[in-house]
Amino acid sequence: MSQDNASQAEFRSQVDAWMQDNRPADPGFLLPQTFMEVGSEQVLDFLREWQHKVWSAGYLGMAWPKEYGGQGMSRDFQRIADEEMKRLQVPICFNVIGLGWAGPLILDNGSDYEKEKYLKGILNAEDIWCQGFSEPNHGSDLGSIQTRAERDGDDYLINGSKIWTTMGNYAKYMILLARTDPQAERRYNGLSFFLAPMQVDGISTQPIQKITGEYGFTETFFTDARIPANCIMGEEGQGWRIAMQTLQYERGAEAGAAGGISILSIVMDDLLRMAAEIEREGEPLLKDPVTRDNLIKFMIEEKALQLAEKRIEIPALCRDYPNSIALSGKLRSTEFFRRMRQYALSLQGAQGSLYVGDQDTIGGGFWQRAYLNNFSTTIGGGTSQVQANIVGEHVLGLPKD
Amino acid sequence: MTTSTLNGTTNIALSFSDEQAMLLDSAKSFCSHKSDINAVRSLLKSDSGHNPDVWQEMVALGWTGIAIPEQYGGFAMGLGSMVPVIESMGRHLLGTALITSTLAAQAILRGGSEAQREKWLPKIVAGTVGSMALLDNEDWGSKLCGVSTAISSSSDNSSKIVLSGKKLLVADATVADFFIVSINHSGNPALAIVEASQLAANAISANTLIDETKRAATVDFSGVTLSPDALLPQSEQALKDIRLIGALLIAAEATGTSAATLDCIVSYLTSRIQFGRLIGSYQSLKHPTVDILLQMDSSRSLIYHAATLLDKGPEIGPVEGDTEVACRMAKAQATETLLFAGDRAVQFHGGMGFTYDCDAMLYIRRAQWAQHQYGDAQHHRLHLARLLLD
């Protein structure tokens, strides 16, 4: 966290005060940790209302232009607002594909018409966005995308299916990657990128029940779905490049995203607090030598993860393998959190066998759900095993298998 | 509780100056030239474990004065600047007494009187070797004061201190010009300066170490007679500091050795063909190798974090709070990483790995040595738990 100047410090305390005054009361259900957990209308309405409120107060899209619903201020202010929201653990701003992916892309590449049409609805949560990259049977290998987009007069006809569409059943728009040229010599060159409407004939969604028993994703089917030709972003064949550009915005407000927190993080603190409250043999778990040793191992790992983010900015300390930290970040952090959450459940004793919905669960079943949901991160976006191959091959120079 | 995530204040300070970067570059280059693997192997059976000419060059480069203030002839760059040097030495298994002599200098700087500093520090900068004599038993968690003292009244009526007892695993004892000995002085822990010339004949008996690039000995201090001005006045704090700084320097060295171990593995995995394929293409070898890389990354982040915090504080202030946490985390992480890397290096070399000719042997032996210097991982985690969980 960089040092605030006077006006930033004042702003920080202003955000802090607003959040304290306006944070929603306990809704009676477990707050979603990520935007992938919006599994019911009840949760959707709650998050929609919250995001609208944050935007109305001026704490979302602060660095986006005023004419499109933003504040036209420096990115530093959004960063500060995000830091405060994270610190105070207020609910997430859930329209993440719009705020963090489609929005900045439209700001950078879009026409005035597109900016006018899409940006404000992203910020005020009226228009929910989803993402259509992954397909059944292809996992994260985007080069293998089969969904077809065929030009037909003023339209494109879309046929195929997408999977792991977050909020597919609630979304108004999708950023869609589809194949316009099956004959292209390099398979990546045959892809195009669309800002596609979801409420058209021929598009249907099937909610996927997750390992947690909840919903949050859909499979999305396209059967001769007709979308206007001007929905394409860029030219035909530029889809891959634009998709890759989109992924860059994920790094947050600094990179052009609208801001807002997209995840309620679980940190070692949460685990330590839990361990302090559980008793074994009449003593708090936090006094048990074996537990203490394990907790310290996790704390060392957490510290190393945090430090990696800083070391990446010091090239002299990254000479051996300059891309190591960047390419291994997902693998390290997602696996760390998986093991940490698994460990948390192991400490709960008999109560660890309860689940969300049982009144005797610790923290409402927070850890149970968090552990199971964590697999979305060790599997999604390239499994840990694929990530390890990438690191082995691209960082260490090991041969492909 | 000085440091905790419980109150939301995690210290993740990390900085590296241009001077440190230059030092890292020059140390890497020096160590790779002076200590290639053939040079390392040629010294395995030697008495001192190092090449005296190389030691003199290191002295000429100023490495013995890096963390010593200017008024004592040093370069006042701070202990944080020792870390890249020691890491580079670890990378090339370059022996010498630099670590233990640096610690002896820090003991005098932190615990000594002005007269002791003025007498010894310029000599250390010029290449005089001091060594730490701390261990009485296998436990780094003990008070380390098993050498006891008796006050003997001598004929000239001044009080003299007579030592009795041995110290174990005293690093580079045979080349040390003096020792900093932890003693039990009338029931209190203290550090005393003992010159090599004061030792009885045959007081030093060399150990056979699992790591043949290192040298250590049991040193019998019995009968050594000292005047009270051989004691460091601020012994207790200095002893605590030295143990933490020692842990960090061993961690830095181990991190360098982990990098070398990783290079050794990668080089084999990208050249050895079995069943018609380069063995590095097998995920059963590839993925653990990636694990070694990630753990090494953690070790490196942690040692430079500790280096950053050491240099942030006053030059000779106590090592405590976040800095103590950082030193302990660095040691716990770095030597466990090297244990894993060395172990896998042997295994991945197959039959070749079982031979003395395979360099993996050097790394697995260094790993076993390093884990026990200045407290093993479990020792440091025990203390971290007290610092962070209570």
Image: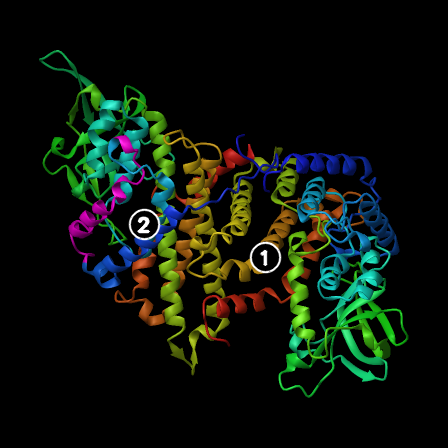
Q: Which class describes the residues within 10 Å of circle 2: few (<14), some (14-19), or many (20+)?
A: some
What segment is highlighted magenta in the picture?
B43-71
Q: Which mark is residue B369?
A: 2
Q: Which residue is mark 1?
A: A335
Image-quadrant location for residue A225: bottom right
Q: Which class describes the residues within 10 Å of circle 1: few (<14), some (14-19), or many (20+)?
A: some
Looking at the rendered structure, the secondary structure element under dot 1 is helix
Place of residue B39 in the rendered image (x, y in percent of width and height, measured from the top left): 21, 60
What residue type is disc 1 on? Glu
Is residue B281 part of the magenta span, yes or no?
A: no
Whether residue B135 is visible to the viewer of this picture, yes or no, is: no
- State whether residue B256 is above or below residue A86: below
Quarter containing the N terminus of chain A: top right
Place of residue A247 in the rendered image (x, y in percent of width and height, measured from the top left): 66, 64
Say which residue appears at 42% left-offset and 58% top-offset: A319
Say which residue appears at 63% left-offset and 52% top-offset: A342
Q: Is residue B162 left or right of residue A371?
A: left
What residue type is disc 2 on? Trp
Q: Which mark is residue A103?
A: none
Place of residue A11 in the rendered image (x, y in percent of width and height, measured from the top left): 71, 37
Say which residue appears at 12% left-offset and 33% top-offset: B197
Place of residue A37 in the rendered image (x, y in percent of width and height, measured from the top left): 77, 56
Q: Is residue A285 left or right of residue B246?
A: right
